[in-house]
Image (cartoon, helix red, strand yellow):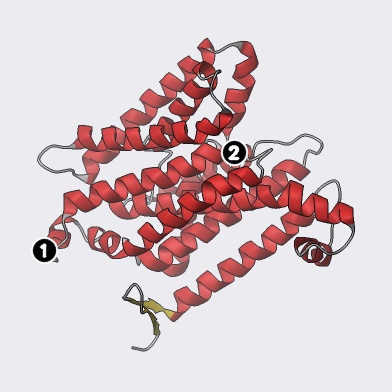
Amino acid sequence: MRGFVTLRLRRPPVSVQVGKRAVAVVALLAAATAAVAVASLGAGSLALSPMDVVRALWGYGAEPHVFVVQTLRLPRILVGLMVGAALGLSGAILQGLFRNPLASPDILGVTGGAAVAAVAFLVYGQGLRILWLPAFAFAGAMAIALFLYLIAWKAGVSTFRLVLVGIGLKAATAALTTLLVVKSPIYLTQKAMVWLTGSIYGTAWIDVGLLAPWLAVLTFLVAVSARHVNALQLGDEVAAGVGAAVSRQRLFLLMLCAALCGAAVAVGGAIGFVALLAPHIARQLVGPSFGPLAAASALIGSLIVVAADTVARTAFAPLDIPVGVFTAAVGAPFFLYLLVRHRNR
């Protein structure tokens, strides 16, 4: 078939057809993301050229360059890439699931569930090691997603009820988070507020090790679930007609979305609007088919987070502004634009 290429794996036996244009766009996005990551590694109080960065990545060059790149900046960049990819994938799943370009974990309360659990840990978990924070945020996102599905259930789950219940849960989790912050000791308030804004400041190799296995497993599950999302995007009746178990697959995809969102929020905090922006931009570039859309969304999410974090830590140096401030500055106007554009649909 003209305009398409076939990708096959022997083990597991997987065969997919993707458009050549989508392959080219994903390749360009991967190159752009790598270029931004190298530029970010070289930006800072000690400015390095791209060649110095590449040499330092392999352990060559001046010793201070190797230390700055490998110890101080590389873990932060890798965390930014993974957090952005996880948010982009979670947004792509939700928008495909609800057939609504305005759906995102931020708007449906999934991010809010992770935030409540994380702030509760910061306020009441003083005797626990900070390594438990990701587990709490992850559990909060999963719990709110399951609660959302159960509340919206009425002889099946419609996307309309899920969206309405999700918006209500977002308001409830925001109120609960505010209550926890107000009741927290003053010395914890600033820490909680920075986390709620979204920041990857101070992330280290241990954070890379925490997030990478989760993201690898969840990305594989997203890849094997692509055909289910494509079926659900056709509508419940058509999806059921082609043999899809609509309610069961919708629950699985919702939990998968929550797991991706929880993993990202656990390490990077509540970075807003990336899950909304990335899949929407990706859809304009590669179309609605979920396989290329998921790959492009992950890359665009990584690109947004790393670019925003580079600006956040260099534009106001020596201050290190939370990356969520910059994603919100871009995302909020874009969200209003989407609302106006889709107001009559």
Q: Amino acid at mark 1?
A: Gly
Most distant residue in the bottom direction: 2
Quadrant occupied by the N terminus: bottom left
Extreme right residue here? 62
* Residue 253, position as x, y percentages in the image: 30, 51
Amino acid residing under circle 2: Gly
Quick one: label 1 or label 2, which is nearer the N terminus?
1
- Residue 241: which numbered mark, if any? 1
Q: How far across and down, in percent of the image, does residue 86 sit?
A: 48, 51
**Residue sitting at x 59%, y 38%:** 324
Q: Relative to 63, is 232 on the left or the right?
A: left
Are the residues flagged by discs 1 and 2 in contact, CB closer than 8 Å?
Answer: no
Residue bearing the label numbered 2? 324
Q: Residues within 10 Å of mark 1 (few under 14, many from 20)?
A: few
- Residue 169 vertical placement versus 328 (above, below): above
Residue 328 left/right relative to 201 = left
Q: Which x, y percent locates residue 151?
A: 21, 32
